[in-house]
Image: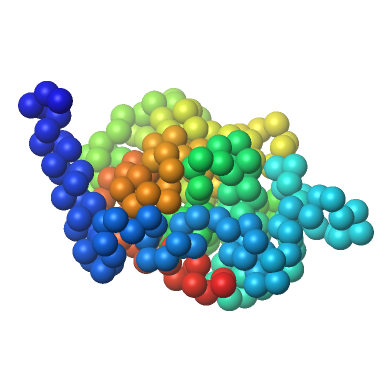
């Protein structure tokens, strides 16, 4: 390891220690707080204590909402939404994104509650600035954050000619999961199968967020990896603390 990389590693280790100490969690703990908080357990956490099958695709008599080609358990969605205060529409998107990424990259072990926590911290699940999710999961009116002009936030000059954010001078974060255009260009996904990757659509945004977190973090049951993934989403220790607090709250509430 070169001398130039050593301070960066020390900062990362210190960051992990700060967050774990704030939580009262040992660094050796495989996940934050409990073994089911950040890992999707299909038998219990995703489908409830009765261990209903979340994918239920093999049960033609079971009417279930279909998102990204996977059938979700509507009873679990309804129960968990009531327990957590997350809208059923947003929760279905987070859960579908989790199932999709777990199918594509099972080594990531992303939890629905991590996506839900980011969705809450970023836009209160698509309801910030007076917006709301319509039946198709689109934020109406469209959610556009403040200009990243180097004032309150890091300066990011326009990278998409205003195509996503309407600003041809500076980039702005957009949609329920607040993607900046540069990140959307890399990780943007079509989460609802309509052939369009739209950051204002919660299905697309949630799947894209899951893809980003897994790409940047790897196995998210590892505390350090989880911290690194969320830090890549927003480079703030305070932000990381908020996300882990909300993720833990959601997981406990939905059990």
- Residue 52 at x, y = what percent? 73, 64
Quarter location, residue 239:
bottom left
Q: Nearer the viewer, residue 166 or 241?
A: 241
Q: Residue at x 62, y 65 (%)?
A: 44
Toward the left, the furthest residue is: 3
**113 left or right, relative to 240:** right
Q: Is residue 171 visible?
A: yes
Q: Residue at x 11, y 23 (%)?
A: 2
- Image quadrant of residue 216? top left
At 39% from the left and 40% from the top, the residue drawn is 217
Q: Position of residue 208 (x, y in %)?
A: 53, 39
Q: Is residue 113 above or below residue 108?
A: below
At a point 31% along the width and 48% down the height, the residue shown is 224
Q: Is residue 225 left or right of residue 213?
A: left
Q: Is 4 or 94 nearer to us in this picture?
A: 4
Q: Quadrant of the N terminus?
A: top left
Q: Nearer the viewer, residue 12 or 116?
A: 12
Residue 64 coordinates in the image, percent (x, y): 80, 57
Q: Is residue 119 left or right of residue 64?
A: left
**Residue 162 visible in the current orientation:** no
Colour scheme employed for the rendering of this structure: rainbow
- Count numbered badges in the picture: 0
Name the residue furthest front: 28
When the figure is inspected, residue 144 is found, relative to residue 243, above or below; the finding is above
Percent of width and height locating residue 199: 54, 41
Image quarter in which the C terminus is found:
bottom right
Farthest residue, direction right = 61
């Amino acid at each position: 390891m070169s001398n130039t990389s050593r301070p960066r590693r020390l900062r990362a280790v210190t960051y992990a220690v700060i967050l774990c100490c704030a939580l009262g969690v040992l660094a050796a703990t495989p996940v934050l707080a409990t073994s089911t908080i950040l890992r999707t357990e299909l038998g219990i956490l995703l489908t409830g204590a009765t261990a209903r099958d979340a994918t239920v695709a093999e049960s033609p008599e079971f009417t279930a909402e279909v998102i990204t080609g996977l059938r979700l358990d509507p009873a679990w969605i309804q129960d968990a939404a009531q327990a957590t205060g997350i809208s059923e529409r947003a929760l279905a998107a987070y859960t579908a994104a989790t199932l999709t990424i777990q199918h594509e990259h099972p080594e990531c072990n992303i939890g629905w509650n991590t996506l839900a926590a980011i969705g809450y911290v970023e836009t209160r699940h698509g309801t910030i600035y007076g917006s709301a999710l319509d039946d198709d999961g689109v934020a109406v009116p469209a959610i556009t954050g403040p200009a990243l002009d180097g004032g309150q936030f890091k300066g990011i000059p326009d990278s998409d000619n205003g195509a996503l954010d309407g600003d041809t001078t500076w980039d702005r974060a957009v949609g329920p999961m607040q993607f900046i255009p540069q990140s959307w260009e890399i990780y943007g996904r079509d989460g609802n199968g309509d052939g369009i990757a739209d950051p204002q659509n919660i299905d697309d945004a949630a799947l894209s967020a899951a893809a980003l977190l897994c790409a940047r973090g790897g196995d998210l049951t590892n505390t350090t990896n989880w911290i690194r993934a969320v830090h890549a989403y927003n480079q703030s220790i305070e932000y990381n603390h908020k996300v882990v607090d909300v993720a833990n709250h959601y997981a406990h509430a939905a059990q």
